Amino acid sequence: MLLLLVKTSTERFGIATITTKPMAKDYIVLFRGSNIEAGRILFDLEEIGIRGVLRDQQTSAARSGFAIPATSDEAQVLVHREEHEKAKSIL
């Protein structure tokens, strides 16, 4: 599940409260492929005013402490459901 961290305005003991909101249903996979191609697509999306999300299972697992073998170089680029049609124009 893809989660979006949202900072709330409530502060307790000087530490900001962080809540999580699932965002998987609001985002659609636009592209699956190598990290290099995904990076280029993210760049192209920014050029037309769309903010994409890069999902890379290998990097996510390594950052959270779960080592997984490097079986593939697959990354996914996700875009918001409302911007999907416009985003397809760059493919």
Image: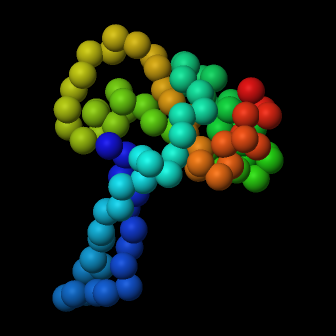
Please give left or right for residue 46 compared with residue 18 in the image.
Answer: right
On the image, the x and y values in percent for residue 87 come to: 72, 40
Image quadrant in which you'd find residue 5: bottom left
Q: Residue at x 68, y 49 (%)?
A: 83
Please give left or right for residue 66 compared with residue 62 in the image.
Answer: left
Work out whether residue 33 or residue 12 is closer to the camera in this orientation and state it.
Answer: 33
Image quadrant in which you'd find residue 70: top left
Q: Residue at x 35, y 61 (%)?
A: 21
On the image, the x and y values in percent for residue 18 come to: 30, 71
Q: Is residue 57 above or below residue 9?
A: above
Report the colour scheme: rainbow
Q: Residue at x 31, y 63 (%)?
A: 20
Please give left or right for residue 13 compared with residue 90 in the image.
Answer: left
Image quadrant in which you'd find residue 68: top left
Q: Residue at x 19, y 88 (%)?
A: 13
View extreme (top): residue: 71
Q: Quadrant of the C terminus?
A: top right
Please give left or right for residue 40 compared with residue 38 in the image.
Answer: right
Q: Quadrant of the N terminus?
A: top left
On the image, the x and y values in percent for residue 9 come to: 38, 85
Q: Is residue 84 above or below residue 34?
A: below
Work out whether residue 2 or residue 43 is closer to the camera in this orientation and state it.
Answer: 2
Number of numbered discs on residues: 0
On the image, the x and y values in percent for residue 51 come to: 64, 51
Q: Is residue 77 above or below residue 37?
A: below
